[in-house]
Image (tube, grey):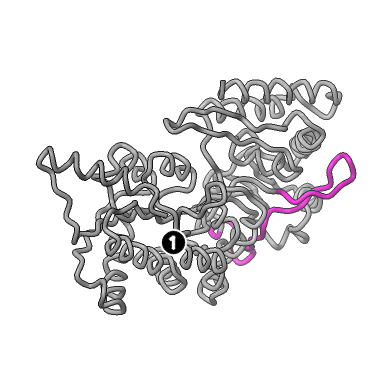
Amino acid sequence: MKKFATMILAGALAAAVMGITANADEIKVWVADNVVDFTNQQIEAFKEANPDFAGYDYIVEPVGEGDAAGNMITDVEAGADIFGFAQDQIARLVSAGALIDVEPENAEKVTAENDPGAVAAATVGDTLYAYPLTSDNGYFLYYDKSVVTDPSSLEAIVADCEAAGKNFYMEINSGWYQTAFFFGTGAELTYETDDDGNFTACNASYASDEGLVALKEMVELKASSAFQNGSAAGEATNVAAIVDGTWDAGAVQDLFGDNYACAKLPTFEGADGETYQMSGFGGFKLLGVKPQEDEDKLAACDALAAWLSGEEAQIARFEAVEWGPSNLAAQASDAVQANEALAALGEQLQYTIPQGQYPGDYWSLATSLGDSIISGELSMDSSDDDLMAALEKFQETCESYAQ
């Protein structure tokens, strides 16, 4: 657990030489701006419940999950002792020595009490490196229950929309939403990086039987008269179903009124006759602890991170700012279950994979693949050979980004 202690000690000695001294009695915490006040309140409760750690000076600073990892990697020594970050940054943080593995007793508790997707997002190799905070970034199905009678089946949803002359929205030319089909059939697309964040390997199997089934399903969906490409509820018209995220819950409620309903993504019957559960990317917020040379300070940081990510704190954070919990008991609470969007997302995240790091070019490449379906270049008239050729070209290009 203390494998980075030498690195941190060296950094501290270097800082001392330059006249910079770290305050051993100060614990710096970075969180998103909208939870700074909440975190300060939680720390006061933590100090009251843990008098042994009350002697530290806890400093909470507003640094969002999108910026925290870059700042930590740039200067681990000057970075926060505890910090929130997005799950796709965990490999870089581990490589930079900015995260210490969760101590064994806490790791056992975290694994038992949080949903599997969040635990996987906090894990590198076989080691848990962070405390899950949320399971609330992903997509699922919003639908008008006066139109859609069976939200569990993509075929049934599309048929209901067609019969009612209504639209079904999904953004198939997006590298984020597109994975719902490919990952659902078992196709793979992940990347590995080195210590500097360079892409060193691409694990891809889109050019496969599984990938072909996924691509055929996308082509079939586009062929429906109900299909509209998109995921922004504010831009949807005549809509009865849309694949979207929690950020648009208010807009969808305005669209559907009393007929507002949510569900996990549906299954679909593939061209091979098998039934597949739609999958995709899942997004999670995590809380990390920086390695410390002072064992007492490390114990305080571990204890506070466990407190801030525990069941009670996650429920309180949901009530304060509506962050969706990763803690299983918090997810099952009446307050969270009453939020239909979060309940649907929580169910969907059981079928997703945490989004890792992807080259910037991947996203534009995925857009091109979807555009080829939308334009009709790939259609119901395309042969299996033509579709496989498109997948082979896509996969080869994805692999080239890691060479």
Q: Confirm whether residue 182 shows in the render.
A: yes
Residue 207 percent across, percent down from the top left: 75, 28
- Image check: 397 left or right of 104? right
The reply, left or right, for residue 214 in relation to residue 12 is right
Q: Secondary structure at mark 1?
A: loop
The quarter in which the N terminus is drawn is bottom left
Residue at (33, 49) in percent of width and height:
5
Residue wearing tag 1: 103
Residues 162 and 38: in front is: 38
Is 256 colored magenta in this rendering? yes
Farthest residue, direction left = 19
| Residue at horizontal 28 percent and vertical 57 percent from the top | 29
For disc 1, the neighbor class at 10 Å (few under 14, some 14 to 19, many from 20) is some
Q: Is residue 55 above or below residue 89?
A: below
Q: Residue furthest right?
A: 273
Magenta residues span 253-278
Image point (25%, 41%), residue name: 10
Q: Quadrant of residue 6?
A: top left
Percent x, y of residue 204: 67, 32
Q: Is residue 77 magenta?
A: no
Name the side, left or right, on which 265 lies relative to 294.
right
